[in-house]
Image (tube, helix red, strand yellow):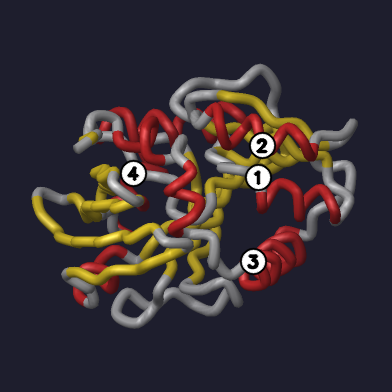
Amino acid sequence: MTKEHSKWFQSWFNTSYYHLLYRNRDYKEAEVFIKNIVKYLNLDKDDSILDLACGKGRHSIFLNSLGFNVTGLDLSKNSIKEAKTRESSSLHFDVHDMRNLYNTPFEVVLNLFTSFGYFEKDLDNFKVIQTIKSSLKQNGIGVIDFMNSPQVIENLIAQNSHKIDGVTFKLKRSYSDGFITKDIDISDSDKTYQFQEKVRAYSFQDFEVMLSNAGLHLLECFGNYNLEPFNIKTSKRLILIFIAND
């Protein structure tokens, strides 16, 4: 059995199994969210957008189809390799660690679909927020789309399984030491694998502190992709809109 828990995001996101397990994600919902964000931020077509931790680039590609100049960055070489097949003069992808500053500033920086809290150390996660601030042009806007951790923890499904194209996924979820963890056992013909997802369960209050410490001002907080008000007890998402204080 192949087992991989060290730096889980580097191994798991690079596998075909990750994309197989999540292939039925709601793309229409994602497009509605992007349209709502674009409208709320009142973006100009000249605005440059950074999609930080972009995966295969589904958000980047849709934003670009709306007429924006978009750069997508992700640590997964395989995801970026596939995303690059969609590149154009106004759509670019690159392999990059989101803790480190990229080489150009943007009007808007997006971190979507719970692509935050991957690192064991709080300092490394905080570096991502610092990077977002440093990546923004003057008066630029940052957006973090995270899970509503208390609601997720309260409704955690301990275990379930899926069979997709002959591959069996057994999923076990738990919360401990400030992390929500999903252990993933995979059976594919005569081979078995183990992977893990592990995300720091940051709360709204945690983000308030991190944003303030990074010199960022919280403008608004929404609780779903229709941009309805955030409610800590019922909202599924925690969508933070912020701007640099200086």
Which is nearer the eye, 105 or 139? Answer: 105
> Which residue is painted at 70% across and 22% down in the image?
104
Task: Measuring from the top left, give residue 210's x and y in whole percent.
Answer: 35, 42
Residue holding disc 2: 82
Cα separation between marks 1 and 3: 12 Å
Residue holding disc 3: 27
Residue holding disc 1: 57
> Which residue is painted at 17% across and 70% down in the image?
158
Q: Secondary structure at mark 2?
A: helix
Pick the quarter of the image with the C terminus: top right
Cα separation between marks 2 and 4: 24 Å
User: As shown in the figure, which amino acid type bears the numbered disc 4?
Assistant: Gly
Residue 117 - label: 4
Q: Earlier in the sequence, mark 2 or mark 1?
A: 1
User: As shown in the figure, which amino acid type bears the numbered disc 1?
Assistant: Gly
Q: Secondary structure at mark 1?
A: loop
Q: Is residue 175 visible?
A: yes
> Which residue is painted at 35% across and 68% down in the image?
162
Q: Earlier in the sequence, mark 4 or mark 1?
A: 1
Task: Measuring from the top left, give residue 176's x and y in whole percent.
Answer: 10, 54
Q: Nearer the viewer, mark 3 or mark 4?
A: 3
